[in-house]
Amino acid sequence: MPVAIDYSTYSQYPEEQENFRQERLKYNHVQNLSEIWTITAKAYPDIVALKDPHAPRPSTLTYSQLQQTIRQFAAGLYACGADLQADSPQLPARVALFADNCARWLIADQGIMMAGAANAVRSSQAERQELVYILKDSGSKVLVVENKQTLDKLLPDLQSLPIHLVVILSDEEVSVDLPMKVVNFNQLLAAGEQQSLPEVKADRQTLATLIYTSGTTGQPKGVMLTHGNLLHQITTYGGAIALEPGDKFLSVLPSWHCYERSCEYFVLSKGCTMIYTNIRHIKADLKEFQPELLVGVPRLWENIYEGVQRQFREQPASKQKLVNTFLSLSKKYFYYRRLSQGLDLYHLRAPAITRMVSGLKALILAPFHALGDKLVYQKIRQATGGKVKLAISGGGSLAMHLEDFYEIIGLPILVGYGLTETSPVTNVRRPWHNLRGSSGQPLAATQNRIVDPETYRELPQGEQGLVFLKGPQIMQGYFNKPEATAKVLDDQGWFNSGDLGMITPYGDIVITGRAKDTIVLSNGENIEPQPIEDACLRSPYIDQIMLVGQDQRNLGAIIVANLGALEQWAKEQGLSLQFPVDMDKQAVLDLFRQELNREVRNRPGYRADDRIGVFRLISEPFSIDNGLLTQTLKVRRPVVTERYRDMINSMFN
């Protein structure tokens, strides 16, 4: 039998040792994810595991009920005739799962694994061609879809695929002329109620899921993650994230995506209550459910920040001035405090005298911050429910003005790093070592290495290069794509992330850009767009931004303007302007030029080539619906470039 990972010698971060010891005792000898639900049902039988208030039929499940429902789903697959014969001991049968956030998603996900199969997952909102490609590429013979609408989208292609069973996660009755059996959620559970379930023989080397990349630059690739890959996340997150049974977690990111998924597995392994929400309801749900844990991507934190700023702009000028004074003093307070603690990225090796003087300055400013907290920041925290113990951000860098804001209001964010190919987390900041600007130190049994992009020679500490990663969470490879796998995964287990970064003296990884996102100007200068974009987002008038300028003399930008902030500005200036119609007026363009110049120049490490020479303003946001954002709210740069090709060309003519 495969042995569990040995963390007994892992002592790099003493603060985590007791947490790791507890996790090892509970889960380190578990061999597959299905075993988790038996353990949690015994440990937390009456604690609410899942709450789905916005489903067509709102539901609440305790841990005991969750384990039973997962088992019924698994047994129901067999009762309805699913052929789940494995290809090999490590390669089980595949079941496609095309659905989005809801309690039934998790039940289906884990029911498929408890039945001894692996799933191939994607959002039900994905394009039909992509879903059909995944069905074919994964070799799935069973299909689980969110609702009849998703099934209807796929109907024209199902006749030619070897699908023999379709499960609809809704309660809809389906009567279609198909050569395969179609059942809904309740029918499947009823069929599985009396059905015996074969013993699952999956171990840590067995494939658990195929998560397909977005495919913005070609056909998507199926990332092969094993039970061991995902169990590593469950047994190591606890070293950095302290949660108690019954703590509440709001789920807002796509459940099928690796980041949200691994977080869900972790919080459920700890006996927490997971509540499904969405962008439309999150503001009200934060106040109603008062979660202890929030997990998001930079765009989510930007949305919350902008909501606060919008309310702030509506206040009388005298109150705005008072709040700005407190914010300015608090910003200085935290700057000096971080400097005194050795937690300023740009002064990690500050002399002892500098740290001591900074500590004294922080001590002088502390009462002003405390007063600001009592009068202002507490009220802002109430918008998140007032009980958040921990907030985690991943899926991209967090702009420094957001770091400032959340630290000041008492909601410091722990930024993590990883990719779908790494299950996904390899690094995360710790509450006791929250080095802003970094993505934290590695998780247990995980290694980081920085290499020269040309020679792959390992670079010394502090130098920028390609980020290579190694650990128990690294994928097996890309499904049926050995050549693509060989390009990123060497025979020693090192994974080429494609990201650029450096490592601090304390082992924190600092991501500086994406190798394939690099913009090369005509003078040969390489520009990493993300840090400059993050700096520009500090402007209240810029909602979203994407830099362009490959092979040009200078950078350009496509900017999604914040129309609400523009209207307020025009009113204060006494200008009779209507937006978005008047966005091309000279006064507006001058405003954005001023904003861009200020924010870019104030960015640490500013160079003359960072200056944005030309820009265009647009009013339509980048979104998932218009195809310009991924499901995890990252800008799809190739798609945006193609959409605005004529506009980009006109910038540089």
Image (cartoon, helix red, strand yellow):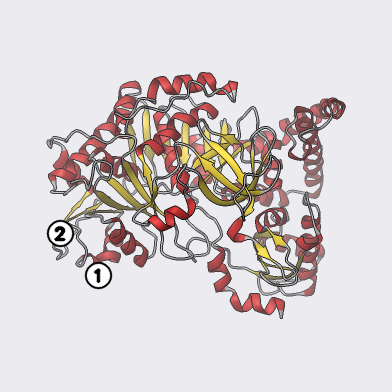
137 lies above or below 404: below
Q: Measuring 49% from the left and 66% from the top, which residue is drawn there?
A: 626
Label 1 sits on a secondary structure element that is helix
Q: Where is residue 324 in the image (x, y as percent from the top left)?
A: 79, 44
The residue nearer to you, when weighing 367 against 352, is 352
Image quarter hosting the C terminus: bottom right
Q: Measuring 17% from the left and 64% from the top, which residue is drawn there?
A: 176
Label annotation for residue 183: none
Label 2 sits on a secondary structure element that is loop
Question: Is residue 170 at all visible to an observer of this figure?
Answer: no
Query: In the rendered image, which quarter is residue 552 located in?
Result: bottom right
Q: Where is residue 131 in the image (x, y as percent from the top left)?
A: 34, 61
Q: Where is residue 299 in the image (x, y as percent from the top left)?
A: 58, 51
Which circle's residue, 1 or 2, is located before the other in the chain? 1
Q: Decide: marks 1, 2 in contact (CB < 8 A)?
A: no
25 lies above or below 288: above
Q: What residue type is labelled 1?
A: Pro
- So how many labels did they put on this image? 2
Q: Measuring 81% from the left and 64% from the top, which residue is drawn there?
A: 573
Q: Position of residue 581 (x, y in %)?
A: 67, 74
The residue nearer to you, when weighing 648 against 57, is 648
Query: In the rendered image, which quarter is residue 540 located in?
Result: bottom right
Q: Which amino acid does label 2 sit on?
A: Met
Label annotation for residue 180: 2
Question: Is residue 443 at all visible to an observer of this figure?
Answer: yes
> Mark 1 = which residue?
156
312 lies above or below 63: below
